[in-house]
C-alpha cells in the first residue's frame, strides 16, 4: 500500500488572471461589435461601392475581417492569460497606505 498524501501546495495554487479586465478582451469585444454591424450593413445595405479597385461589398469584407481579428484577440487572451502578481499588488497597496511592504 502506498501513501499518496504528498504535499502538492505548489501545483494546486491558483493563479489570478486579469480575466474580463484584460485589454485584449475589450479590443475583441469592440472589434466584434463593429464587425457584426458591418456584416449586417453589407448583407442588408442597399448602397454598394462599385467604383474602385475592389469588386464586391467592402462592408462585408471589412466586417468579416474584423470578426476574424476579434476572434484572434479573444483566442490570444484565453490561450495566454495575463497573470496578476499578488506580491506586487500587496507591495503597491502597502506603499499607498504608507506601511512597510510585506516580505
Image: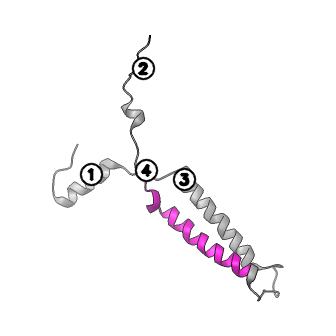
Residue 96 spot, x, y in % from top left: 21, 60
Quote the CA–CA distance across marks 1 and 3: 26 Å
Residue positioned most to the front: 1
Relative to 100, residue 11 above or below: above
Mark 1 or mark 3, which is nearer to you? 3
Q: Which residues are magenta?
A: 17-42
102 and 29: which one is in front? 29
Q: Looking at the image, tell me whether mark 4 or mark 3 is earlier in sequence order.
A: 3
Look at mark 2 in the image and give the residue it sits on: 4
Q: Looking at the image, tell me whether mark 1 or mark 3 is earlier in sequence order.
A: 3
Q: Is residue 84 magenta?
A: no
Q: Looking at the image, tell me whether mark 2 or mark 1 is earlier in sequence order.
A: 2
Mark 2 or mark 3, which is nearer to you? 2
Look at mark 3 in the image and give the residue it sits on: 78
Q: Is residue 30 magenta?
A: yes
The answer to the question of whether label 4 and label 1 lie on touching residues, with beta carbons closer than 8 A, is no
**Residue 41 located left or right of residue 101:** right
Look at mark 4 in the image and give the residue it sits on: 83
Residue pictured at 21% horizontal, 46% vertical: 102
Q: Looking at the image, tell me whether mark 2 or mark 3 is earlier in sequence order.
A: 2
Mark 4 or mark 3, which is nearer to you? 3
Within the image, what quadrant is residue 93 found in?
Answer: bottom left
Amino acid at each position: 500500500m502506498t501513501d499518496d498524501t504528498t504535499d502538492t501546495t505548489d501545483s494546486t495554487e491558483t493563479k489570478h488572471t486579469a480575466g474580463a479586465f484584460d485589454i485584449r478582451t475589450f479590443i475583441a469585444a469592440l472589434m466584434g461589435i463593429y464587425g457584426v454591424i458591418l456584416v449586417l450593413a453589407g448583407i442588408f445595405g442597399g448602397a454598394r461601392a462599385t467604383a474602385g479597385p475592389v469588386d464586391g461589398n467592402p462592408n462585408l469584407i471589412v466586417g468579416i475581417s474584423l470578426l476574424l481579428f476579434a476572434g484572434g484577440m479573444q483566442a490570444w487572451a484565453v490561450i495566454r492569460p495575463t497573470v496578476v502578481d499578488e506580491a506586487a499588488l500587496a507591495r503597491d497597496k502597502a506603499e499607498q497606505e504608507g506601511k512597510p511592504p510585506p516580505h
